Image (tube, rainbow, N blue to C red):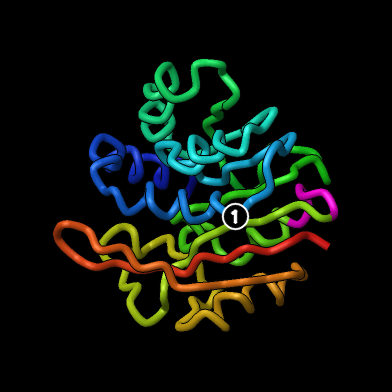
Amino acid sequence: MDHDARAALFDSTAEHYDEDTFHARVADELVAPLPPEPDLVLDVATGTGFAAYAALRLKPSRVLAVDLSPAMVAQATAKAAELDPSGVITWQVGPAVPMPSPDGSADVVLCASSLHFLGAVAFADWRRVLRPGGRLAFSVVSGARFRPSGAFADFVPRDITFPTDDAEAAALATSAGFVDVSARTFTYRGADRVRSTFVVHATAP
């Protein structure tokens, strides 16, 4: 499935994406333990901007948020006047792998609720853009529960095995060369169902 087809598929979900409060909670969990006042934060596959906006709590100098879907980015930027009045976040439509950022330029890379559409190839790019000691925070679905269907199933990557426990989730980052890796299961009890994901934090060597 090419970029245009992928973008069109996510465009079709953008209008109601913010109704799923699970994504906001995952973004909060990713950002909470990160060190304050980074220079550059990259939000990979930002969607409607949950992680980018959560990153503002760190008081970064800059945030670059990228997503393939124009409609998702439009939903994100519509919230900027209220949530980012100073314009710290730069929004860009385009592929999130590779990120449009120079080697070793980022202090933090965030990827919330998107790795299952990016695949293992994303890890090499995250190592590329992070400076030594930079922090990575991502979430990843459980292989025991993730059952994509319909058009979405057509572009779940084949280069990644989704973890079934915390140790396997941590191993995704460790095997990609990251250090100081931690992983835990985050469970969210919404109004209609209980959902969980693995939340992983790691450091670029």
Q: State which region is magenta.
A: 127-132
Q: Relative to 10, say whether 56 is above or below.
A: above
Position of residue 63 measured from the top left corner of the image (x, y, whole percent): 62, 32
Looking at the image, can residue 45 be seen? yes
Position of residue 190 measured from the top left corner of the image (x, y, whole percent): 22, 58
Is residue 131 inside the magenta stretch?
Answer: yes
Provide the secondary structure element on which disc 1 rests: loop
Q: Relative to 118, say whether 198 is above or below.
A: below
In this rendered view, identify the residue nearer to me: 132 or 46. Answer: 132
Position of residue 193 measured from the top left corner of the image (x, y, whole percent): 19, 65
Q: Quarter holding the C terminus? A: bottom right
Q: Quadrant of residue 149?
A: bottom left
Q: Residue at x 63, y 79 (%)?
A: 171
Looking at the image, can residue 1 be seen? no
Q: Relative to 23, say whether 106 is above or below.
A: above
In this rendered view, identify the residue nearer to me: 204 or 68. Answer: 204
Residue type at the position of mark 1: Pro
Q: Residue at x 57, y 66 (%)?
A: 200
